[in-house]
Image (tube, rainbow, N blue to C red):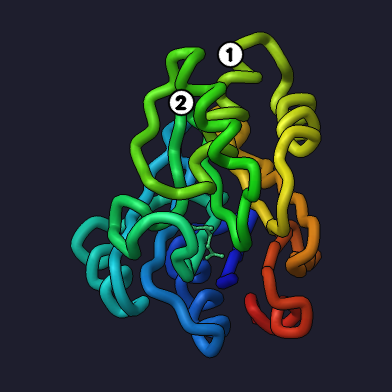
């Protein structure tokens, strides 16, 4: 179970998100990624291995955007590859997740039968696919989040951003910690309840 950070900010967030992830490095991880929303478009960078690899990628291809989420992964379902690294994207929805979605296999079968095409081997992708489906079916993002949470079982902390909601991170937890921090005109999310306070200072 690894690290989640998020910022709804008033200045660019990608570097700050990676700095915040560094404070969670003590937990161990095998890959990392960051996603932001910029001008109505979700973008991400992901890398296997240490955060320095993600930083190198970001130097070559910087990520703009004032709202974003980031993750260090400790793989439980699917190999520790860049493709399986979080955030996972489906139709304008981006998800990072700590923990395990226990009923992912049943949900994956159901979503696949409805036409979803899975791009990763992770349990996490069912969350992104299910949210995207519920929104396509006409639900608001908030209702979709609540409906998704009624379907998933297991121990999880989740942070979600939506391409067309540039000032919002939705988050949920059942088991693993997730703390919300308030800054000056900004809000923060961190999966380490104690360090979250210091994460963004
Ligand atoms: N179960 C998820 C995965 O394998 C999340 C693992 C974690 O907590 O980092 O991608």
In the visual, does 136 lie left or right of 61? right
Number of numbered discs visible in the structure rendering:
2
The reply to whether discs 2 and 1 touch (Cβ–Cβ < 8 Å) is yes
Q: Is residue 91 above or below residue 120?
A: above
Q: Does the residue labelled 2 lie within 8 Å of ligand 1?
A: no
Q: Name the residue under label 2.
A: 91
Q: In this view, does 62 lie above or below 89?
A: below
Which label is found at residue 197? none
Secondary structure found at label 1: helix
Find residue 8 and report its horizontal and vertical position in percent: 65, 53
**Is residue 168 shown to the viewer in this render?**
yes
* Residue located at (37% from left, 68% from top): 31
In the visual, does 195 lie left or right of 128? right
Find residue 159 and report its horizontal and vertical position in percent: 64, 51
Q: In this view, does 36 lie above or below 12?
A: above
Residue most extreme to the left: 60
* Residue located at (74% from left, 33% from top): 151
Find residue 80 and report its horizontal and vertical position in percent: 34, 64
Front-lying residue, 185 or 22: 22
Q: In this view, does 27 lie above or below 105?
A: below
In the visual, does 150 lie left or right of 42? right
10 Å crowding of disc 2: few (<14), some (14-19), many (20+): some
Residue most extreme to the bottom: 26
């Amino acid at each position: 179970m690894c690290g989640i950070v998020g910022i709804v900010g008033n200045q660019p967030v990608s570097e700050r998100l990676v700095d915040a992830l560094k404070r969670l490095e003590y937990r161990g991880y095998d890959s990392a990624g960051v996603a932001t929303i910029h001008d109505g478009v979700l973008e991400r960078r992901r890398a296997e291995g240490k955060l320095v690899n993600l930083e190198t990628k970001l130097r070559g291809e910087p990520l703009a955007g004032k709202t974003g989420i980031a993750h260090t992964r400790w793989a439980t379902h699917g190999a520790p590859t860049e493709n399986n690294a979080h955030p996972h994207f489906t139709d304008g929805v981006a998800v990072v997740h700590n923990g395990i979605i226990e009923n992912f296999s049943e949900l994956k079968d159901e979503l696949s039968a409805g036409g979803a095409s899975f791009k990763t081997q992770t349990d996490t992708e069912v969350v992104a696919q299910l949210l995207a489906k519920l929104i396509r079916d006409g639900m608001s993002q908030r209702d979709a989040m609540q409906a998704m949470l009624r379907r998933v079982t297991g121990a999880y902390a989740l942070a979600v951003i939506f391409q067309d909601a540039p000032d919002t991170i939705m988050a949920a937890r059942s088991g693993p910690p997730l703390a919300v921090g308030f800054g000056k005109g900004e809000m923060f999310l961190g999966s380490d309840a104690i360090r979250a306070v210091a994460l963004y200072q």
